[in-house]
Image (cartoon, grey):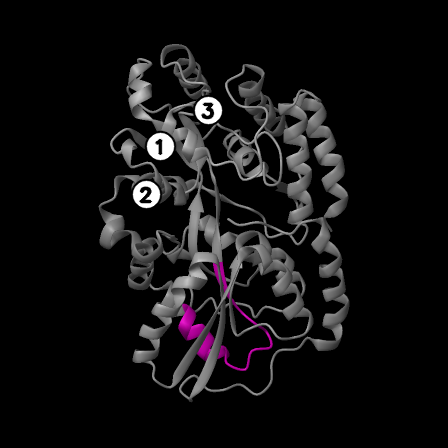
């Protein structure tokens, strides 16, 4: 999952909507898939840097197609996509962050997916669902991610605990034991506020049985929301988690020095820890999220979309099919450590043997999607504010949930 739109971009989106009425459409004359052509592709972050090599291999098997990959930084991706959409100049194929999907589908600039070519059953349920808007599918899952629990096994043993916590009560007890028996500064790291605090809180909400929407409207004042806010806030009330962190805080550094022995995060941290904290080899592990009512994470990641204005839709669909194929996804994991969205890829290569990867697979089977809402950026910011009000002692969980609902309900529909 990557950054969503912020308040400053809302005006750009509105301007794009107004402009699209003049520049939309379904593309010009289509180039047949077997004709000589150039396919334009935008990919973000690390994926943009590494996709070129995969595209080169694809070209060798398909010499009539030239794939032109343009890397785009995640920090400018949203603005660049909005500008291109407004001008009718999106590339043929675009990597689309999971929380962007609702916005760009609503703008009418994406070609619906041919569900006879790409099958829902091949992908993790949440990865597929994040691409569905008003019953239509607009993206093919490329890679996925889920939050799990990272913890220091050596410090847990020092605290007298020899297995991963499986419930909220056990996770709280482990955080307390870390401080009291293993003499750590903190018991756990959770995001207390700032942009995207919702990413840490949402696993609590989903694990409490919560649903972000009900009948297409926000459902953030439910008993599950109150329960999740109370459980999350308790770590700060008890002094088990920091109430203040700097933007860009690197939890892995404190994980390495032992001051923070536990945190929630995604799969990229396994590589981060191995590369930047090599002294921890054999001293840490990942585990499924401890359960409230259930153990339920949320699925992020990226999908691949085709521009409605593309004149190369057949070739675009073929290239996406190549990237979504199990063998390609298994290879992509070894290049990037991005977790495949295609379930069959998990039976191949390193993924089939990696015990940490199995934890993520278990979590992904039950993970829930972020609903593909055009207003998600604004909704996320309201959740961030509710989390902050609880962690900083400015509101009770009941008050925060009520305000969160009242501020998000007018945003949708």
Marks 2 and 1, how far apart at CA: 20 Å
Left-right relation of 156 to 264: left
Residue 52 appears in the rendering: yes
Residue toward you, 214 or 240? 240
Q: Is residue 208 above or below residue 323?
A: above
Q: Nearer the viewer, mark 3 or mark 1?
A: 3
- Tell me where residue 407 appears, x and y as whole percent: 75, 38
Q: Disc 3 or 2, which lies upstream in sequence? A: 3
| Residue at disc 2, secondary structure | helix
- Residue 84 as seen in the image, left or right of residue 280: right
Quadrant of res 282 = top left
Instruction: Residue 368: give x, y in percent of width and height.
Output: 50, 43
Identity of the residue drawn at 65% across and 29% down: 388
From the top left corner, tell me how far across and down residue 112 is, in percent.
Answer: 55, 68
Relative to 11, is 362 above or below?
above
Label 1: element kind: strand
Residue 6: give x, y in percent of width and height.
Answer: 67, 49
Residue 295 visible in image: no
Q: Is 117 located above or below residue 260 in the figure?
A: below
Which residue is tagged 3? 188
The label nearer to you, 2 versus 1, is: 2
Query: How many C-alpha atoms fall within 10 Å of the one at disc 3: few (<14), some, or many (≥20)?
Result: many
Q: Residues within 10 Å of mark 2 (few under 14, many from 20)?
A: few
Q: State the residue at coordinates (42%, 23%).
A: 259
Question: Considering only order in the chain, which callout, 1 or 3, is on the residue closer to the N terminus?
Answer: 3
Task: Report the residue marked by disc 2.
Answer: 275
The magenta segment:
303-320
The answer to the question of whether label 3 and label 2 lie on touching residues, with beta carbons closer than 8 A, is no
Instruction: Decide whether residue 349 is among the magenta residues.
Output: no
């Amino acid at each position: 999952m990557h950054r969503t739109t912020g308040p400053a971009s809302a005006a750009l989106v509105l301007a794009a909507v107004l402009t699209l009425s003049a520049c939309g459409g379904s593309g010009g004359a289509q180039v047949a898939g077997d004709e000589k052509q150039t396919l334009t592709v935008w990919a973000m972050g690390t994926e943009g840097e590494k996709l070129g090599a995969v595209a080169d291999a694809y070209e060798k098997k398909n010499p009539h197609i030239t794939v032109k990959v343009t890397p785009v930084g995640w920090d400018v991706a949203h603005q660049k996509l909005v500008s291109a959409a407004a001008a009718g100049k999106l590339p043929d194929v675009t990597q689309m962050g999971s929380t962007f999907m609702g916005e760009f589908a609503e703008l009418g600039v994406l070609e619906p997916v041919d569900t006879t070519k790409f099958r829902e059953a091949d992908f993790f349920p949440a990865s597929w669902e994040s691409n569905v808007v008003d019953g239509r599918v607009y993206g093919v899952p490329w890679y996925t991610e889920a939050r799990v629990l990272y913890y220091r096994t050596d410090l847990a043993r020092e605290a007298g605990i020899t297995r991963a916590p499986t419930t909220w009560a056990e996770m709280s007890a482990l955080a307390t034991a870390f401080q009291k028996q293993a003499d750590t500064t903190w018991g756990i790291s959770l995001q207390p506020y700032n942009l995207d605090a919702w990413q840490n809180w949402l696993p609590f909400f989903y694990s409490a049985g919560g649903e972000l929407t009900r009948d297409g409207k926000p459902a953030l004042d439910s008993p599950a929301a109150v329960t999740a806010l109370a459980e999350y806030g308790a770590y700060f009330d008890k002094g088990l988690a920091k109430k203040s962190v700097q933007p860009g805080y690197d939890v892995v550094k404190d994980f390495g020095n032992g001051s923070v022995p536990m945190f929630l995060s995604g799969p990229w941290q396994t590589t981060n820890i191995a590369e930047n904290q090599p002294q921890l080899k054999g001293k840490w592990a990942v585990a499924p999220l401890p359960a409230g009512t259930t153990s339920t994470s949320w699925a992020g990641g990226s999908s691949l979309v085709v521009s409605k204005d593309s004149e190369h839709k057949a070739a675009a669909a073929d290239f996406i099919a190549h990237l979504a194929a199990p063998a390609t996804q298994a290879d992509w994991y070894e290049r990037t450590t991005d977790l495949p969205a295609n379930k069959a890829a998990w039976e191949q290569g390193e993924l089939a043997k990696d015990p940490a990867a199995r934890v993520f697979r278990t979590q992904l089977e039950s993970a829930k999607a972020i609903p593909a809402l055009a207003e998600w950026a604004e909704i996320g910011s309201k959740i961030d504010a509710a989390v902050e009000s609880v962690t900083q002692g400015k509101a009770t969980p009941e008050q925060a949930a009520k305000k969160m609902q009242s501020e998000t309900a007018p945003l949708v529909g």
